[in-house]
Structure formats: structure tokens, C-alpha cells
Image (cartoon, rainbow, N blue to C red):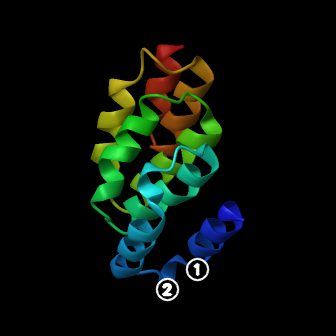
Amino acid sequence: MKVIFYTTLLENIDQVTIALLERIDADYATTADPDPEVKQRWLPMGLTLFYTPAYDAAHTWVSSVGRCKYLTSVYSALQSSGQHDLGVEWYNENLDFYHPVAITTEAHVLGLDSIAAFIQ
């Protein structure tokens, strides 16, 4: 049910406000939720809307999980919301941690395709 709720919010992000995120987070502690399926939806939404509590959580998340399924949503949110430099910073911090497939995939998301080809 949680996944359906957060997916619905994400699908209607144009109607989501910071005040709504704060209320949901206060009621359900969503930013701290350990469920990766929740993080995959909540953190990108928070980054897209510049919800401050999402930043540390997302940074920790992309530095501790290597699965593209979870990484891509965060890097895509940063890229599409004009936070490219922050995405590149986090990506570069984790190059030694990410699998070559993740390096290539996330480089593509961030528009760094030539760098990924060089690394491999």
C-alpha cells in the first residue's frame, strides 16, 4: 500500500507541495523509511521539489546502494530539476563503489556518456 501511495504522489507531482511533503514526513517518517521501494519514489520526489530533508537521505542512499533500479530515479530527479552539478558530484564520489553497468547507466542519465566509455 505504501508503494501505491508514493507512486500516486509521484505521478501527480505537479500537485505536491513542500507543505504536503512535510506533513507526510511528519506523520510517516518517510525520509527515514528503510524500505527501498519507498526511497525509490520519495527521495526523487523530494529532490525534484527541493525538499531539504531529502538531500542527506538521497546522498546516503546513492552511496550505499548500487542497483540501477534505485540509483537512476535519484540521478534523473537531480538532472531534470536543474541540479546536474550535484548529481555529478555524488556520482563521482561513488565511482569506485558502482558496478561498471551502474557507472554507464548513471553517466548516461547525467549526460556524461563519453566519461563512462572512457572508464570502461
Q: Quadrant of residue 69?
A: top right
Q: Residues within 10 Å of mark 2 (few under 14, many from 20)?
A: few
Q: Which residue is mark 1?
A: 12
Residue 80 lies, in percent from the top left, at 44, 60
Q: Position of residue 72 (x, y in %)?
A: 56, 44
Amino acid type, mark 1:
Asn
Extreme-bottom residue of the structure = 15
Quadrant, the C terminus: top right
Residue type for callout 2: Gln
Q: Residue 15 — which label?
A: 2
**Residue density around tag 1, few if under 14, some if 14–19, many if 20 or more, within 10 Å:** few
Q: CA distance from mark 2 to mark 1?
A: 6 Å
Residues at marks 2 and 1 touching, judged by CB atoms closer than 8 Å: yes
Q: Hey, which quadrant is residue 48 in on the image?
A: bottom left
Query: Up-down: is 91 above or below 41?
Result: above
Residue 73 vertical position relative to residue 24 in the rendered view, above or below: above
Per the image, label 2 sits on a secondary structure element best described as: helix
Where residue 4 appears, as percent x and y from the top left, is 71, 67
Q: Secondary structure at mark 1?
A: loop
Q: Is residue 120 left or right of residue 2?
A: left
Q: 24 or 59: nearer the eye?
A: 24
Residue drawn at point x = 38 percent, y = 59 percent: 47
Quadrant into which the N terminus falls: bottom right
